[in-house]
Amino acid sequence: MEEVKCYMPSTLKEALEIKSKVDCIPLAGGSDLMVAHKRTLGLTPRFDKPVMIIRNLKELRKIYVNDKGECCIGSACTSTEIAENPLCPWHLRQAASRMGAIGLRNSATIGGNIANASPKGDTPGPLYLLDARVKLSSVNGEREELVSDFIVKFRTLDLKSDELITEIIVPYSEDDFDYIFWHKVGTRKANAISKITLSQAIKFASDGTVADYRVSATATGAKTNRSRDVENIIIGKKITSSLIEDVIKAFDAVISPRAMPEFRREATRRMIRRFLTVSATHPKEKVIDTYDGYYVTGQPEPRRK
Ligand SMILES: Cc1cc2nc3c(=O)[nH]c(=O)nc-3n(C[C@H](O)[C@H](O)[C@H](O)COP(=O)(O)OP(=O)(O)OC[C@H]3O[C@@H](n4cnc5c(N)ncnc54)[C@H](O)[C@@H]3O)c2cc1C
């Protein structure tokens, strides 16, 4: 059996010191890494570098509200912890609750999902939509960056060799929205990698014009897609059928799905059309979703403050 050198720091400080001196792979839940490094049946995964297990660092397991009123999620928090914590923003809880299946959600972490930098990752969709930031820490200090800038492209991050993702900071911007939408298209309810995940949110001004609109999509290009230029098409205007078609056409030009492109484009168009059409009728309920072709509306669970 081949040996893997493994570091198990007991504090974040210790982990950052190791990272500053040793070229090692941080392992959180291991759900991506163990698959990426797997070998044939009966053989342990092969790692060509030492591994540093960060999953149990308590500094990375906290979910709290900071003094600016933003939701801060430790990078080693699992999908289950996020899905079940009412402090976490609604869109993110939806994405976390539909990742993989129960076993996976108990080990997969949000830091690992971001660092995997897969366009099919479920949490970047809500994180782009809500202008979330990552906190990156090293022995030299901390810095913050928008998740949408941090994920440069497929499997490429703006991460220095001595840094770890320590926190994900999500403004509670969805409180400001009148209607919210999140939908994952997959082949099954569990263990289905996204065909597309679409997140949307809209706010109306008192004169009925759109005060803000946001839309992000995963699995529709080399990274999660969001475009302020597209959103600006509808902002400041009253929703009409032709305006909806303008938004759809513009977003269609932004996305570039490689596999099943027409299926992904058509599903995206339909979800945008439905959300904007239903929200323009100003239903009582805040959550707008689609299920088997029908509109479903409801209220989000109240968030504990
Ligand atoms: C059966 C199965 C089903 C899946 N279903 C889904 C799904 O539905 N949706 C989805 O989005 N994904 C899915 N995945 C992918 C995977 O589970 C997720 O991407 C998960 O969030 C990865 O987290 P992790 O903690 O397991 O990452 P790990 O495997 O521990 O790490 C992944 C990468 O992130 C790096 N990393 C981890 N934490 C940090 C940190 N704090 N700082 C810097 N780098 C870090 C690691 O070095 C590695 O490069 C699935 C995987 C499997 C095996």
Image (spheres, grey):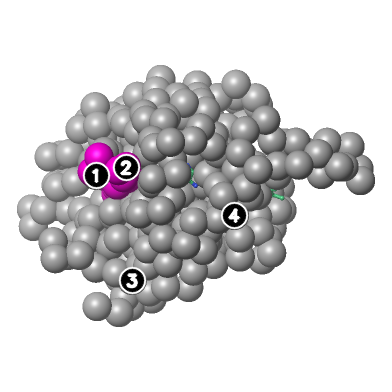
Which callout, 4 or 2, points to the residue nearer the camera? 2
Report the mark closest to the observer, 4 or 3.
4
Q: Which residue is mark 3?
A: 87
Q: Which residue is mark 2?
A: 138
Identified by mark 2, the residue type is Ser
Q: Is residue 160 above or below residue 240?
A: above
Residue 290: x %, y % from top left: 51, 56
Q: CA distance from mark 3 to mark 1?
A: 24 Å
Mark 4 residue CB less than 8 A from any atom of ligand 1: yes
> Would you say the beta carbon of the disc 2 residue lies within 8 angstroms of ligand 1?
no
Distance in Å between CA atoms under marks 1 and 2? 6 Å
Disc 3 or 1, which lies upstream in sequence? 3
| SS at badge 4 | loop
Secondary structure state at the residue bearing disc 2: strand
Q: Are marks 4 and 3 in contact (CB under 8 Å)?
A: no
> In front of the other: label 4 or label 1?
1
Tell me which segment is drawn in magenta: 128-141
Residues at circles 1 and 2 in contact by the CB criterion of under 8 Å: yes
Total labels: the figure holds 4
N-term mark: 3 or 2? 3
Q: Residue 130 location, x and y as percent? A: 29, 49
